[in-house]
Amino acid sequence: MPKGTVVASHSSAPLSDIARSMLKYSTNLTAEVIGLSATQKRGGAPSSLSASAREMSAWVQSNLGAKSAKFVDHSGLSDASRISAQDMVNALVSLGANGPLHGLMKEIPARGQDGKTIKSAAYKVRAKTGTLNFVSALAGYIVGADGTPMVFAIFTADLKQRRGIKRADRERPQGAKGWSRRSRLLQYKLINRWATLYGT
């Protein structure tokens, strides 16, 4: 710290509040800053975002059992990052169904096969979405009607469609909206099935 007299100071909101908002609204810049700050807090001195992401990859591999994890950023915005669905589940299990991450994730309303909210659903879901053109992910926790904790990760992608997107069409590629809707319906069906089979 430099020597001198403090003229003004400002304290941010608690990290838990910042992280909860970041997960809810998918604010990529906040994710990158949190990741860089975490690397520095652990004693690292990353020269770039990708260097910090490599530190995070090593930590996740060593501490959360996600051996396939290979990240190039902290937000997941790049399609060069890699992790298997099994390793994502391993990481979530390691953190615990009642661990700190569960409470930071946003509650996902239960939906039927038509996509409409099921207000009478007895199970609860807290999860994080991830969306790129022709790529959709949902991972998190389910608490069954009987209190049974479950962990899940669903990754879907049409890589052929994604590779075929022209640069000029990247903001709104043809067919991407309908594809994402079908992917979300698949996610709802899987979650409903798991909650019914294993949580009652």
Image: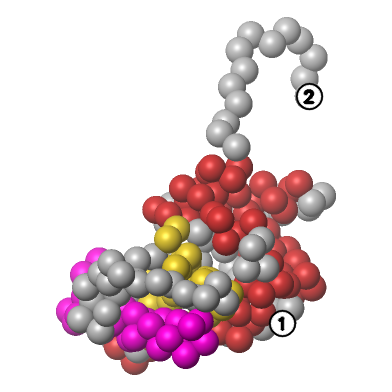
Question: What scheme was used to colour the molecule?
Answer: secondary structure
- At numbered mark 2, what does the secondary structure look like: helix, strand or loop? loop
Q: Position of residue 156 (x, y in %)?
A: 40, 85
Residue position for label 2: 1
Residues drawn in magenta: 171-200
Between 165 and 188, the one nearer to me in the picture: 188
Between 195 and 78, the one nearer to me in the picture: 195
Q: Residue at x 48, y 65 (%)?
A: 126
- At numbered mark 1, what does the secondary structure look like: helix, strand or loop? loop
Q: Position of residue 117 (x, y in %)?
A: 25, 69
Q: Amino acid at mark 1?
A: Lys
Q: Amino acid at mark 2?
A: Met
Q: Position of residue 143 (x, y in %)?
A: 52, 71
Is residue 80 at least partly visible in the picture? no
Main SS of the magenta part reads: helix
Q: Give me the C-alpha separation between circle 1 and circle 2.
A: 38 Å
Residue 12 falls in image quadrant: top right
Q: Residue at x 72, y 82 (%)?
A: 67
Residue 147 left/right relative to 124: right
Q: Is residue 1 above or below residue 72?
A: above
Residue position for label 1: 67
Do the CB atoms of the residues marked 1 and 2 lie less than 8 Å apart? no
Residue 183 left/right relative to 90: left
Residue 169 falls in image quadrant: bottom left
- The N terminus appears in which quarter of the rendering? top right
Does 186 lie within the magenta span?
yes
Does 103 lie within the magenta span?
no
Which comes before the other along the chain, label 1 or label 2?
A: 2
Q: Position of residue 99 (x, y in %)?
A: 66, 61
Residue 79 left/right relative to 114: right
Q: Residues within 10 Å of mark 1 (few under 14, many from 20)?
A: some
Is residue 85 at least partly visible in the picture? yes
